[in-house]
Amino acid sequence: MTRGEVVTEARRWIGTPYVHQASLIGAGADCLGLLRGVWRTLYGAEPGDVPAYTPDWSEPQGDEVLWRALAARMPGRALDDEAAGDLILFRMRDRGVAKHLGIQTRIGAGARFVHAYSGHGVLETALSAPWQRRIVARFGFPDIQEG
């Protein structure tokens, strides 16, 4: 599979309503659900069971549950080595846990990403300076080829 296929699949989800813990194109997804759905299309099955989670994730405990789970399943990439098709992990507030995901669709001056955003659904957004400042990790999809 190629980076282009990751981007194409992420964009197919645009317009899906935001639904916490959902992962069904056109019906509902949260940011993890978007990743799960893209993963299923690319690989045929999810990499493991996803336990129930609250919207605050593990913020009260300060536990980076999502970051650890991603690192166990996806190859990490340097923050400054951006590529279309990367999964990006965001910390939404200072000293909060990293709990928002997106898939980068374009790099450079017009950088963009697809994500499921509460109150908006799945959309493609400019990866503006405020969003870039929140990126804490970058991952590649396994067995990805350039393209």
Image (cartoon, grey):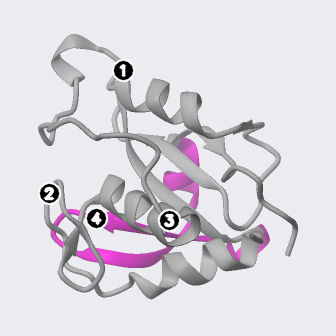
Who's the residue at 62% across and 40% down the image?
74
User: Is disc 3 placed on a helix, strand or loop?
Assistant: loop
The residue stretch that appears in magenta: 108-133
Q: Could you give the CA–CA distance between mark 3 and mark 2, rounded to whole angstroms?
A: 22 Å
Closer-to-camera residue (137/41):
41
Classify mark 1: residues with Cα within 10 Å, few (<14), some (14-19) or many (20+).
few
Question: Looking at the picture, does residue 3 appear above or below residue 12?
Answer: above
User: Is disc 1 placed on a helix, strand or loop?
Assistant: loop
Task: Check disc 4 and give the amino acid type.
Answer: Tyr
In the displayed structure image, the side of residue 3 where residue 26 appears, left or right: left
What mark, if any, has residue 20 been given in the picture?
2
Tag 3 residue: 44
Q: Could you give the CA–CA distance between mark 1 and mark 3, rounded to whole angstroms?
A: 36 Å
Q: Earlier in the sequence, mark 1 or mark 2?
A: 2
Tag 1 residue: 95
Task: Check disc 1 and give the amino acid type.
Answer: Arg
**What x and y, as percent, mark residue 106?**
69, 74
Who's the residue at 50% across and 61% down the image?
39
User: Is disc 4 placed on a helix, strand or loop?
Assistant: strand
Task: Check disc 2 and give the amino acid type.
Answer: His
The nearer-to-camera label among 4 and 3 is 3
Q: Earlier in the sequence, mark 4 or mark 3?
A: 3
Q: Earlier in the sequence, mark 1 or mark 4?
A: 1
Tag 4 residue: 117
Q: Earlier in the sequence, mark 1 or mark 3?
A: 3
